[in-house]
Amino acid sequence: MIHVCHAIGCNVQVRPQLLMCLKHWRLIPRDLQRAVWAAYVPGQEIRKDPTDEYLDVQRAAVEAVARKVDGMTQHEGMEIDIRKHKHVRADVAAGIAALRVQGRQIWGSTRHTLPEIVLRLTIVAGDLARLARDGEAALDVGEYTRSLKKELGNILLSTIRWIDDLGLDPLECLDRAIEAQERFTKSRRPR
Ligand SMILES: [Zn+2]
């Protein structure tokens, strides 16, 4: 069986006992690298029985690499495109599905129409505008950050619900948005 690097979007083949290709492994902080090997039980890749501890540390390592890659300029082999990379696309779909279910648990089967959605977006935009205007000056920093997280989280969670309310496919919506944003940045004159 082919075993590939666990870094998101990487398809480099590596030996089964290794978590990542060398390029991605080097992006993991030292102490986390050590934790990966500390949790590794010889033969787990053959028995397919990694411990919970290993899976936790693996997740932390994958996230650490993803954060590093985010902060780096795109370079060869590290580009992510949810339109092309099937397993990344499946991960995105699964995450959105979980959020949709969470939203349904809160709101039940109530569905919003487009005018209702527009009204609610306007309210969120108003709350954000107030935060931007008064910002940290009016609130203490902790409260400012909490409000900011709440408002942006609201947009994320609600948009997934609204896409479902309108009977649209979230991945298709994302594809269109990615295309449009790419077109937009490419059409701008170089600075
Ligand atoms: Zn890799």
Image (cartoon, rainbow, N blue to C red):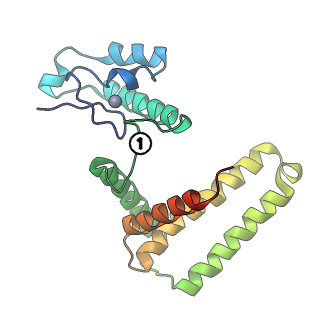
Q: Is residue 55 above or below residue 35?
A: below
Q: Residue at x 45, y 73 (%)?
A: 163
Do we see residue 105 in this rendering?
no
Identify the amino acid type marked 1: Glu
Which residue position is annotated with label 1?
79
Residue farthest toward the right in the current orientation of the protein: 137
Q: Is residue 160 above or below residue 49?
A: below
Q: Residue at x 46, y 66 (%)?
A: 103
Q: Is residue 175 above or below residue 21?
A: below
Quarter of the image for residue 125 reads bottom right
Q: Point out residue 73 in the picture as x, y percentages from the top left corner.
A: 53, 37
Relative horizontal placement of residue 66, taking residue 4 as reference (left or right): right
Q: Point out residue 114 in the picture as x, y percentages from the top left corner.
A: 53, 84
Q: Residue at x 20, y 21 (%)?
A: 15
Q: Is residue 1 above or below residue 111?
A: above
**Ligand 1 rendered quadrant:** top left
